[in-house]
């Protein structure tokens, strides 16, 4: 434990005790935790920072959208709107936040909404869509005013919650013991080649309870996609220089991936969920102009792209080749079949869904 962590440790303990008391108030039913007669899947984590919630929500959407009417519900981090907002084709980052905009841009069949008060959001969704088959709660592990039917906890392979500390000494939002509320634990951002020995070691570290299923996922990057309104170039298998700009918690997996496409990778890091300004774009343009080679390209994440499209910032980068990298989640060692069956069994066995599921199959 480094010196800064030691200094901050008493504050971390006080914070942890407060969160522990809060959780006990829910456990003792002094604070209300409401259940709903509709399948609700919560996806979240114990820590601050990126564990891969967005691509895992997308994984669930792909699994369920052809079988059931699906909706996503999040608070809409970074948006400027208030209250409940149901996304439409004209929605922007300022209306619904970057993750929700990403869901709306990619999936036509689902409903996407945001509301800081999730219970209200669920009730409005149920009234608007009586045949709704499942609601996916984004980043709601600590939102205990709702009792989900299935709770999924994500933990980053490179920063497992069992090795982390409470904020401000570390990044944990609550004591490690909070993992016990999960039905499913997913170790995210593992390497695509993953040994059984490593899997066994991590399983022994986490020590999942009898009722918990433990899975291991990794990220698969898709081909580069040009941001609408920017310059398109003839894509190559390799570039002299890639300029990466990213406002996400952890860009290291993307950095490692991009290094296979270039001789030099230049990275501009911005805070997580960063709201880009004209000044930021000028900084990106300046760094790109300083690259001597002509064989160069600008790459960002899909989430960062959502904070730029449908804004005036596009005009500033219209003459630059700016691309983003979509990602998908894959599971190791037969995990995909097992988790798919677990999710589908939970959603399909709900009384309102069983008939529809049998008809679809």
Image (cartoon, rainbow, N blue to C red):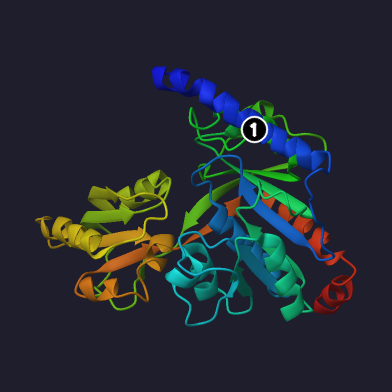
* Of the pair 85 and 199, the residue shown nearer to us: 85
Q: Residue at x 24, y 55 (%)?
A: 243
Relative image position of residue 303 (x, y in whole percent): 43, 61
* Of the pair 177 and 56, the residue shown nearer to us: 177
Tell me where residue 343 sits by quadrant.
bottom right
116 to the left or right of 361:
left
Q: Residue at x 24, y 73 (%)?
A: 233
Position of residue 99 relative to residue 168, above or below, is below
Is residue 175 in sight in this rendering?
A: no
Is residue 11 in sight in this rendering?
A: yes
Q: Residue at x 41, y 67 (%)?
A: 306
49 to the left or right of 154:
left
Q: Please, which residue is most extreme toward the front here?
A: 30
Relative image position of residue 113 (x, y in whole percent): 60, 70
Within 10 angstroms of label 1, few (less than 14), some, or many (20 or more) residues?
A: few
Q: Residue at x 65, y 61 (%)?
A: 117
Total count of labels: 1
Q: Please, which residue is most extreme toward the bottom here?
A: 89
Position of residue 3 relative to residue 254, above or below, is above
| Secondary structure at numbered mark 1 | helix
- Name the image quarter holding the C terminus: bottom right
87 to the left or right of 209:
left
Tell me where residue 12 sits by quadrant.
top right
Position of residue 157 relative to residue 306, above or below, is above
Tell me where residue 86 sits by quadrant.
bottom right
Relative image position of residue 119 (x, y in whole percent): 72, 62
Which residue was labeled with disc 1?
18
């Amino acid at each position: 434990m480094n010196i800064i962590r030691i200094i901050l440790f008493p504050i971390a303990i006080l914070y942890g005790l407060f969160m522990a008391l809060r959780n006990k108030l829910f456990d003792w039913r002094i604070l209300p935790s409401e259940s709903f007669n509709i399948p609700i899947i919560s996806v979240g984590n114990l820590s601050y920072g990126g564990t891969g919630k967005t691509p895992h929500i997308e994984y669930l959407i792909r699994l369920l959208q052809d079988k059931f009417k699906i909706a996503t519900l999040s608070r809409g981090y970074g948006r400027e709107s208030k209250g409940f907002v149901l996304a439409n084709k004209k929605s922007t980052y300022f209306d619904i936040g970057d993750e929700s905009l990403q869901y709306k841009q990619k999936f036509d069949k689902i409903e996407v909404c945001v509301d800081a008060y999730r219970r209200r959001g669920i009730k409005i969704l149920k009234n608007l869509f009586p045949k709704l088959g499942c609601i996916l709660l984004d980043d709601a592990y600590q939102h205990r005013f709702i009792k989900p039917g299935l709770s999924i906890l994500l933990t980053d392979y490179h920063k497992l919650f069992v090795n982390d500390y409470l904020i401000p000494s570390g990044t944990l939002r609550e004591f490690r013991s909070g993992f016990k509320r999960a039905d499913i634990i997913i170790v995210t951002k593992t390497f695509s080649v993953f040994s059984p020995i490593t899997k066994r070691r991590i399983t022994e570290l986490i020590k999942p309870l009898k009722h918990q299923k433990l899975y291991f996922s990794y990220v698969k990057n898709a081909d580069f996609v040009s941001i609408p309104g920017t310059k398109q170039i003839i894509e190559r298998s390799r570039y002299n220089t890639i300029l990466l700009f990213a406002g996400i918690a952890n860009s290291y997996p993307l950095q490692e991936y991009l290094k296979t496409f270039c001789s030099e990778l230049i990275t501009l890091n911005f805070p997580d969920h960063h709201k880009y300004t004209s000044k930021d774009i000028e900084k990106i343009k300046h760094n790109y102009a300083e690259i001597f080679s002509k064989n160069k390209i600008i790459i960002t994440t899909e989430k960062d792209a959502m904070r730029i499209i449908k804004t005036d910032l596009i005009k500033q980068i219209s003459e630059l080749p700016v691309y983003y990298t979509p990602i998908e989640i894959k599971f190791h060692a037969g995990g995909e079949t097992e988790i798919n069956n677990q999710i589908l069994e939970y959603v399909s066995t709900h009384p309102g869904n069983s008939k529809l599921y049998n008809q679809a199959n």
